[in-house]
Image (cartoon, rainbow, N blue to C red):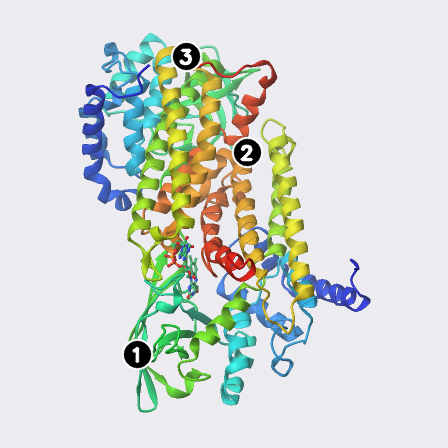
Amino acid sequence: MRLALSAEDAQLQQELREFFTTKVPQEIRDAVRHGEELTKEQIVETQRVLNAGGYAVPNWPVEWGGRGWTPLQRHIWLDEMQTAGVPSPLPFNASMVGPVIATFGSQEQKERFLPATANLDIWWCQGFSEPDAGSDLASLRTTAVRDGDEWVVNGQKTWTTLGQYADWIFCLVRTNPDAPKKQQGISFVLFEMSTPGVTVRPIKLIDGGYEVNEVFFDNVRVPADQLVGEENRGWDYAKFLLGNERDGIGATGSTKLRLQVLKEHASASLADGSRPIDDPAVATRFASLENQLLSLELTALRVAAASKDGKPDPVSSILKLTGSQLQQAVSELAVDVAGADVLAAGAGDDSDVPAWAGDSVPTYLNLRKVSIYGGSNEVQRQIIAGTILGL
Amino acid sequence: MDFTYDTEQLALRDAVRGILGESVGNREKITATEPGWDREVWGKLAEMGLLGLPFDEAYDGAGATAVEVGIVAQEIGRVLAPEPFIDVVVGAGQLIADAGSEEQKRELLPKIAAGELIAVVAHTEPRAPHGTAAYGVTATSNGDGWTLDGVKEPVRHGGAADVLIVSAKDVDATRLFVVDATATGVSRTTYSTPDDSYAARIVLSGAAATPLGDAGEEALASAFVRLQTAYGAEAIGAMEVSVETTVGYLKTRKQFGVTLSKFQALTFRAADMYTSLELARSISTWATMSLAESGPDALVGSRLQAELGRTGRHISQESIQLHGGIGVTAEYSIGHYAARLTVLDRTLGNEAYHLARITDGVADRGIVELLH
Ligand SMILES: Cc1cc2nc3c(=O)[nH]c(=O)nc-3n(C[C@H](O)[C@H](O)[C@H](O)COP(=O)(O)OP(=O)(O)OC[C@H]3O[C@@H](n4cnc5c(N)ncnc54)[C@H](O)[C@@H]3O)c2cc1C
């Protein structure tokens, strides 16, 4: 047993810290630090900076830009990136569709898509969920029917995150409605959002923002060579992808940053000269959250140190479960530290209420999503109970 | 002891439910623009006598108690009615009734009751802790009158108000003043709040003001308890519907070929939500009856607010979670209930603040004696 990093890992950590804090624009990192919504351009710019440095897709095969890092090294990368306020590479590209194409795609698909995906020249979105297929993803109904050299896609997707920015969508479609099990007969296809027959309708969330969409397909014609891997094997690829999606979803680095910034706010004097952090009830919550975060990060490190050949450890469900709860708890504490200032959600720049306090309730409400998407917390408990505990 | 409504109270509840029910479908449209509530509905509430409900008959009121006020508030919570009944009638109105001069009561209360005058309390200040003291607005006496300077923000419904009851620092003491919101020296910027309403930043620069009787922090403390009790009843209404809606959803939403109600992991959590609701209802009912029978008691207000903070959070978080993605959308209702409950918990001091108030002196106090 040994706690210290090896000389090699310590050096990597140093290099990453240096890169993230000097190469990614300060303005973007400040925006992340203060929990501001990033523009499409900022996300693209960051990913291109990372890609140029070889840090956008370290989890991919080496020949497509991967680094062949150990899980621990990948954890260091993620942690340094998040605590430096660097926006993570777009997950749809870097941890979802990229690895699927790299693992299951044809050589031609790899050449066509992987460099553009790593550099965010293509912005991907994820077309999995449907109105009646949420936790029960395998019951999806969107169909693709072969017609000559094309697939004709009909149906509806929903919750498509940032679909309004996307150039391409990776989609699960039913190609064999007669398969004996609903998990069979599903395929994984790629197509451009500008293909005729694709309609995007924004969904407004309770924080007032637009980040998800409904996407409708009306006789969308997809060239046959844009089906990934084998026909009717899409569920296997989806499972592979979802395993990667959960990777890093504990967000320990981001939560550390959020908690640190919130502590600064809570350490500023109020109108009467007192400081929120001096209230024992508030201080106790900071202490407790910091401590829970410590155990979560240690668990993440144990998972990272133990996982073999890139296979997600089922213990990663603990990271998702606890990580999402901690993200939410920090946002809840922010609302409490903000106090009556929470009303000022729509206040402009001439307000005396600091922006973070006005933003606190919308952020809190928005973060309810982290225990719902990427496999809800109930689904994670199911995995822990079933796969790990054998219940 | 009797925890049930009498027939008159039930009739009041049904009448309010009727009026508010008519406008439920318009809520999204109404809240989209300032003032964020419906003047027509406001007029109907006035016609029913609700806007003068707790005032003395001498001021065109109905002389009703906190119990009746609570009935109205609960109905407001059930449909998330955006009308500022609690802010105007309970917040400013009862404060004027409690602490205003005879002249002020005669001047203001009948107009409030008639729905002609919107008055709200402007006490909150940026980064000020909850409490009865003012820090950022000062009062200056110039011989024949008073003027106020400073910033009040965020003030709920401050933009739509005709009259503001402003707390201000006069040397060492905090006093309350009546300010004409449209007078010179008062400038207002309105913005949206996270619970589909509007608040204002109010800058006072030499604004003319009249003291509200000789009211100071004590009057404000009583007003807080009345507000906490009414907001508490509103929260009960919102929690009640949150639980009903969630239970309904579990019975209809299908995943894995069955309704969600087939998963015990979810039904047990619905059971816990219901438990929170009933605990909250009990303490809200107690606080309301205590206010009606014994007047404002800050410790009762703190006990109420602390418990509602805990249960409201539990119910709002679970109601979204059990709905899945649909729960965080603006088109569906449940998230709006969560937003309102979240804001209510931070209006007038949050759970931590009130637990600290209860903690003060906990060693010297016994268990609350309910039966005496
Ligand atoms: C903000 C946001 C962004 C998203 N982005 C995307 C995206 O980009 N692409 C995409 O494809 N999808 C996306 N999703 C969809 C997301 O993956 C689904 O919302 C999620 O799978 C849950 O499905 P559902 O919303 O239909 O809820 P349901 O499946 O209807 O679940 C409702 C509740 O029941 C629980 N539940 C369901 N089944 C069980 C069970 N068997 N046992 C116990 N409890 C159960 C759930 O945990 C939840 O609490 C996003 C969702 C959100 C909210």
| SS for callout 1 | loop
User: Residues at marks 2 and 1, common chain?
Assistant: no
Q: Amino acid at mark 1?
A: Asp
* Numbered tag placed on residue B18 in the rendering: none
| SS for callout 2 | loop
Residue highlighted by disc 1: A178
Q: Chain of mark 1?
A: A
Which tag, 2 or 3, sits closer to the chain's start?
2
Crowding near the residue tagged with mark 2, few <14, some 14–19, many ≥20 C-alpha atoms within 10 Å? many
Q: Amino acid at mark 2?
A: Arg
Q: Is residue B150 visible?
A: yes
Q: Chain of mark 2?
A: B
* Quadrant assignment for ligand 1: bottom left
Look at the picture and state if B183 lies above or below A378: above
Q: Is residue B190 visible?
A: no
Look at the picture and state if A186 lies above or below B333: below
**Residue B11, percent across and down?**
18, 24
Look at the picture and state if A223 lies above or below A367: below
Residue highlighted by disc 3: B371
